[in-house]
Amino acid sequence: MLSRVANHIYWLARYLERAENTARLVQVNTHLLLDLPKDITLGWEPIVDILSFRETFHERYETADEKSIIKFVVSDPLNPGSIINCLANAKENARIIREIIPSEAWELINNLFATAKEDSQSVLTRRHRFKCLEKIVSGNQTITGLMGGTMNRDVGYSFLRLGRHLERADMTTRIIDVRSASLLPDISGKLSAFENIQWMSVLKSLTAYQMYRQEMRLRISREDILEFLLKRDIFPRSISHSIKQLIKCAGELPKSQPVKEKVVKVSKELEKLDTRDLKQEKLHTFIDDLQTSLIKIHNAINETYF
Amino acid sequence: MAIRWGNYYPTPFYDELIRVRNKPRNAAQDLCDYLKQLSDSEISEFKTASTTAIQVMGITFTVYTEEEGSIDRAWPFDIIPRIIPRKEWEQVEEGLKQRVKALNMFINDLYNEQQVVKDNIIPESILEHSKNFLPECRGITPPHGIWAHICGSDLVRDENGTIYVLEDNLRVPSGVSYMLENRHVMKRVFPDMFEKYNILPIDDYPSQLYDMLSDMSPRKVEQPEIVVLTPGIFNSAYFEHAYLAQQMGAELVVGSDLVVDEDDIVYMRTVEGLSRVDVVYRRIDDAFLDPEAFKEDSMLGVPGLLRAWKAGNVGLVNAPGAGVADDKVVYAFVPDLIRYYLNEEPLIPNVPTYKCINKDERDYVIDNIEKMVVKPANESGGYGMLIGPHATKAEREKFVRLIRRDPRNYVAQPMLLLSTAPTLIDTKVEPRHLDLRPFILSGKHTSVTMGGLTRVAMRKGSTVVNSSQGGGSKDTWIVDTEEN
């Protein structure tokens, strides 16, 4: 397979997954806000930090109010990381490899972009937001299903999953990070009463609530949720699951030693991890480190294949 | 009853299907009878079916706009086919083979002995001022002496029914994918007609193309690595590049996918590392092909490609420099070239062409400028032309000055009355002008497509068939009729 084609498949998967997970991220914050008492002013600004777009945001907007942030994160064509741009990039990547991916997948990707573009105004209101974001999540799920059901299991498919799981791991860390120190500084005081509700909304935004209930004990607890989302590879959006998939995909590719080494290293760190140690600040640091490791994996893929 | 042939008046042009009012040509009788009995709603149904088929099959050409990025547009397709009897087509086919053979011999001669200039068949000044002559290619004879492996020659028919060659496209002719897809659409929409007629198939073009490309491989291996080199997704013919690559099972590559090493061998970058390429079917113009040899700032090309080709390590199709014969002035000499190289009379005539380089002819053109179509030597797509009868006085005067300043760069032709064919406009048939582009493949053997791409000027009275300017297309049927 041509390196360039592999590169487009990889980025197609990353952009689609990024769009889906950004939608989930906005979803979780919207839910958090609804669950919190009125007098707690939880900002939207940390969202742009989590997505590492603080500077770009402040270049373009004066105040970090809900509307500006939603617009910036979801539908601003001038924000390179906005959902609409992720989908536009996914579409452009798909277009270039139209004859490689199933034509139905191309149509779905094209449609998903068109729908998101149509919705770019209504998503700003809370009333329509849930529906609009839900369409993006289920749109990517449909595309993933279609590709899984129709594509040859060749190296192209390995690159697709490589991109998807690397992006998913990265974005899941960011979604967990919504709940870390930078977002909610007041952990000991008034907010703690709502802690479980908030963790529940994290689970829900990852469609993880039901699966969590089936796998873990009935009670919602911070340690168990972190255990579930970071370490249990039984759940397909957990970090550990994505890392295992990366190891598997790398195994299907030629010359994959440098990539494999880096993924295995992350895998071992996850195994060693005791989630009970992850108090607020430590969780944030752990996630930062994890994200750095994921960047290293990406760099290794880039150097080896593209 | 929607289609009434009695209301269809093709005169004063030659009509491809209708002989005189209400009298179809023999080969078109069954088709016209069939169309006559269709109701309005059936016609709209067929039209919708063809539009849907085109969308589903993704047959598009690309238009790029600043605002929306790239857009794929469907090319207007007319469901009434153009019919040519097999016997007539066989003569055209022979004529095209003859023409392309002479053209290839001519190109090879120009890059080697230049006997044709020494024998005063072609004036030396033509060569000196040729934009498409590449001095870098002097002394090379590609395998089988073929430079223009793929040629698309545009044919037109005048009011008397005579078929002429209007121009030869020897650089990167396009359109063959539409020819193939138009047939697929017709099979979906009109299966009945395929039972009535003995329509000669065209589907084997991709395999013939593949075989020809394989023959050009310098390595004699079972399965040579063939790639289609495209300028990229913003090129208007990208659909065709992707389509042909897919149909042949070849890799579709852009310049940056290929690399030429110190060893003068072409490789493509794959996830497993560098992998050798044997034949490049390039859809990039000469100037952009190799920044090392031609335009330094070309982002589309492959540095060193020409070097690898000259070393005999890769097949390039069409060969660089083949465009030297794709020149409106050289065109005027093609009948002479056929006589010179093959010692034969041309089987298909040229459109009468005045060479402004000769004083007598130049004077005639200038005196009769209001009747002439004046063409610059090296433009394509209808750019930089003067259509005398439709031009203003100032435009004519401008062209007289241009011709006087640079006579070598201009030829002129009398305004042709292009043939027409019934074309569905809403639910009625009206005559529309058309041309025909067959494709000729030259390798170890020479083959011509059964028919070709019929392009239609969809606007009333227009003779501009280009897709960018309101052109459409039709399926072209070469039919075996009983009287053959």
Image (tube, helix red, strand yellow):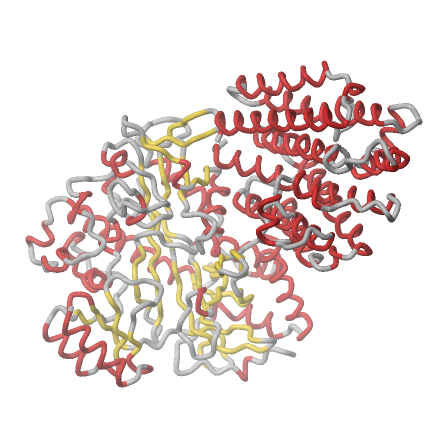
Residue B115 percent location from the top left of the image: 9, 50
Please indicate, yes or no, whether residue B484 appears anywhere in the rendered image.
Answer: no
Q: Nearer the viewer, residue A131 or B370?
A: A131
- In this view, the residue in front, A247 or A156, is A247
Which residue lies most toward the right here?
A218
Location of residue B212 (image quadrant): top left
Q: Residue at x 26, y 54 (%)?
A: B98
Task: Name above or below for residue B389 compared with residue B446.
Answer: below
Residue A138 x/y as whole percent: 75, 44
Query: Residue drawn 87% across and 33% down?
Result: A192
The picture places residue B33, in percent across and down from the top left corner, at: 58, 72
Total residue callouts? 0
Q: Quadrant of residue B32?
A: bottom right
Among the 4 quarters of the image, the one containing residue B167: bottom left
- The vertical placement of A285 against A96, above or below, is above
Residues B56 and B263: in front is: B263
- Is residue B381 visible to us here? yes
Report whether B63 appears left or right of A91: left
Q: Is residue A96 rendered to the left or right of residue A24?
A: left
Instruction: Tell me the quadrant of the picture where the C terminus of chain B can be found.
Output: bottom left
Up-down: is A77 above or below B16?
above
Q: Residue at x 37, y 42 (%)?
A: B281
In the picture as drawn, the residue positioned furthest to the front comes out as A189
Q: Which one is nearer the viewer's eye here, B370 or A38?
A: A38
